[in-house]
Amino acid sequence: MISDQKREVLRVSGLKKCISKRTLVDDITFHINEGEIFGFLGPNGAGKTTIIRMLVGLIRPTAGSVSIFGHHLARDPLNALKHVGCIVENPELYPYLTGRENLELFSRMTEGVPPERINQVAQQVELGDRLDDTVKTYSLGMKQRLGLAQSLLHRPKLLILDEPTNGLDPAGIREIRQLILQLAQMEKMSVLISSHILHEIQLMCDRVAILNRGRMIRVSPVERLLEGDGPVEWGIDPLDRGLEVLQSLPYVHDLEPLSDRRIRTHIPEEKIGDVNRELIRAGIRVEAMDRQSLTLEDIFLQMTEGDSSG
Ligand SMILES: Nc1ncnc2c1ncn2[C@@H]1O[C@H](COP(=O)(O)OP(=O)(O)OP(=O)(O)O)[C@@H](O)[C@H]1O
């Protein structure tokens, strides 16, 4: 095999879910490549959990198809899900059992998990020294790590995690993030991770799908998403004449006066020099020009502007 092309581990086409005449998600199409960390980013209620539940066979799609490692989920669920590990919403754990007993119980329910695997996964999630304590004494972060260990028992090649950092404190969030990055790298695992936290997705993912109101509004590599027309702030004098010049230029948009000498615009990067020249040619003093970089938050707000369910 001489191919540079990465293998697809998951392909989702036209996925839709309706419940009693209400469309929860619609027209969801994307794929995940081998070794890729793919993010679902969207506010609460965007449909992330609903899609994930369909991907792991917990609920049936109204339309569309899911194929995992080339196996059609609806027609061949056992093979499709054989190499998938997941935590949907919260990990299912028995609080009155120890971490080890929980893992033993789950390993007995899963085919082909040798006994030594329990210590391996506990080490991987750095839970080794608390493994024999009861789960009810665990912090939320430790419970998440035990859930992660449980999902790793059968050596999955695709890990699906629904908001794994939800409710954790900043240190716990960082631990889980580092763990996921390590697993993806060392175990060559692909990961689908959902979050409503822009920063998280930005730090972890290779590509991101932005979801809002049950629709996928964009799928893009994280770095390309940030390449948009970032805000540019101008210090100009006089402001009213500067405003006229800026308004006359077709590639300048979203003008927003900030003070009596400052104005914010959105301009493609390659046009910034042209704007500067036009202002000077019109006899306007350009006192400052600050180009601000876009954050995922800006992009998300731009994309969902006027489309928020509140
Ligand atoms: N069984 C159900 N019956 C009716 N509506 C549902 C059902 N499950 C989810 N919904 C609705 O579907 C929409 C999407 O919910 P979903 O839980 O998938 O969103 P989410 O992006 O995961 O958000 P959150 O982070 O809040 O869980 C929401 O408006 C929710 O109220």
Image (cartoon, helix red, strand yellow):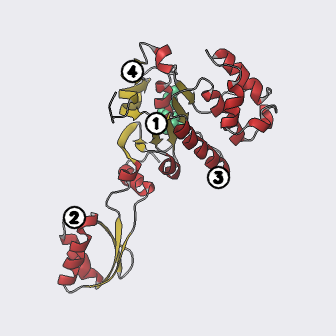
**In the image, which is nearer the foreground, mark 2 or mark 3?**
3
| Disc 1 from disc 3: Cα separation | 26 Å
At label 2, the amino acid type is: Tyr
Q: Position of residue 68 (x, y in %)?
A: 43, 23
Q: Position of residue 135 (x, y in %)?
A: 77, 32
Determine the residue positioned at 41% across, 18% down: 71
Asked if the beta carbon under badge 3 is closer than 8 A to the nearest atom of ligand 1, the reply is: no
| Disc 1 from disc 2: Cα separation | 39 Å
The residue under label 4 is 70
| Viewer-nearest residue: 16 or 41 | 41
**In the image, which is nearer the foreground, mark 1 or mark 4?**
1
Query: Could you tell which of marks 1 and 3 lies nearer the N-terminus?
Result: 1
At label 3, the amino acid type is: Pro
The residue under label 2 is 251
| Disc 1 from disc 4: Cα separation | 16 Å
Q: Which mark is residue 172?
A: none
**In the image, which is nearer the foreground, mark 4 or mark 3?**
4
Q: Does residue 97 appear to the left or right of 207 in the view shown? A: right
Answer whether residue 303 is visible to the viewer in this image: yes
